[in-house]
Amino acid sequence: MLRRVFFASLLASVLASAQEAVPAAAPSAATQPSPVPDDATRVAVLGYHDFSEAQPETEMRMHTSKFRKQMETLRQLGITAISLEDFLAWKRGEKSLPEKCALITLDDGWKSVYTDAYPILKEFGYPFTLYLYKNYVDVGGKSLNSEMIREMLQHGAAIGSHSVSHPFPGVVKGEKKKGADAFDVFLRNQIGESKRFLESKFPYPVTTYAYPGGYHCEEMYPLAREFGYAVLFTVAPGKVRRSSPDLTVPRYMVFGNNEKPFEAAVSFRDGGTVPPAGSSPGAPQKTLVPVSPEAGVVVSSRLPLISADLSTVADLDPASLVMKVAGFGEVPATFDPATKRFSWQVNRKLRHSTCQVAVTWKTLQGKPAEMPLRWSFRIDLPASYLPEGDDTAEHACDAPPTPEAAAAPATPNP
């Protein structure tokens, strides 16, 4: 029965943590080591949960085919998937990384990580990190078992702690009301025992922690240091800099039924999209079909015509075409049957130095295209200039789930 309420409770706690915990839980200077000087690298930490191709998508469950497309998107956009080991070495200032990276994390220990996500990650050669909680290892049903975890550790996986029992924010707050001593015992068990359990069971040092539901508070920070954690992850979205506080590292939770967090994660806005290694700034990058503006170029107009030449795409259902532009969402693009060009004239001045575009479609048989079209280009904006007017759209891809979305019941997963 506990597993049946898991998804609905988790999404609500994600929202609660973003609204309540982050403002009050910024670590004090005394709990933080001196930050390593920043560099040009930015890391998008992606957080996933459960997978299935047959079951309906929910906030926490994603279709396996969509996960594959997202992994392909990382490759198309030149985003380097890095290991946890490299991430930690970079944070310590001991290693340099490409300017545009992703750290792939998978929470809780769902069996579908092994059956659905792991084969795809192995195919792409992407390292990944499993955030496991003690009470959901080797319990049967839809949980991972030790043999699966050990196999993944041999093929690109790392592991981190996700507590003992995955307590949601309401549970943690209830324990805190019992008094400082009782709360200390509770936190020591959740943070310390989970590390001891994982390190005794698997041949991997556990030095990172993912806050269950993203909730964190001041009492957790000295214990995290005491137990030897180097980095702790929240569910607050944002790119990680080398100088980002280690105790509250941002992470994009990628939902199965909402692509906006993923689109925000792969849009490297501060400083723009970084060209792949070996290319010069502004040099065109390769796309499946001709697009305009070309991928990777710098344009001077803040009202460009965005288009894709789909004349070489076979078995295309024009009625199914969808164009999404970061900051605008889905836009009213039109398809010209004569030229096979799908276009949209930007109708409000672009406000960021990078614009990301995604075009999807279905075949005449109603099947989604195997590889959606995604690209980005840059706009030559004066560094200090921002136009007057409504700025709501520029944050559209960064917004957390709405209260209505959080209140919507999730599909139970026994």
Image: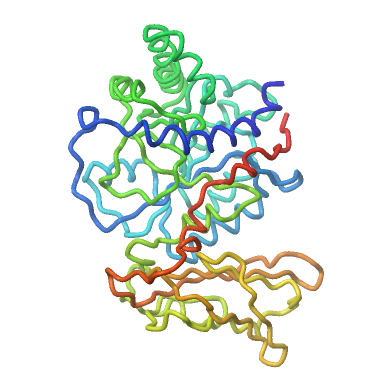
> Which residue appears at 55% of the width and 26% of the height?
146
Q: Is residue 48 above or below residue 370?
A: above
Judge left or right: residue 278 versus residue 265.
Answer: left
Locate residue 101, reporting x and y percent.
Answer: 39, 55
Locate residue 345, reporting x and y percent.
Answer: 56, 82
Instruction: Give residue 250's quadrant in the image.
Output: top left
Instruction: Give residue 284's quadrant in the image.
Output: bottom left
Q: What quarter of the picture does the N terminus occupy?
A: top right
Q: Residue 123 or 61: which is nearer the viewer?
A: 61
Looking at this view, name the residue that lies furthest to the front. Answer: 389
Looking at this view, name the residue that lies furthest to the bottom. Answer: 338
Judge left or right: residue 296 versus residue 142.
Answer: left
> Which residue appears at 49% of the width and 68% of the height?
356
Locate residue 88, reporting x and y percent.
Answer: 31, 41
> Which residue appears at 23% of the width and 41% of the height?
92
Instruction: Give residue 84's quadrant in the image.
Output: top left
Locate residue 49, reporting x and y percent.
Answer: 58, 39
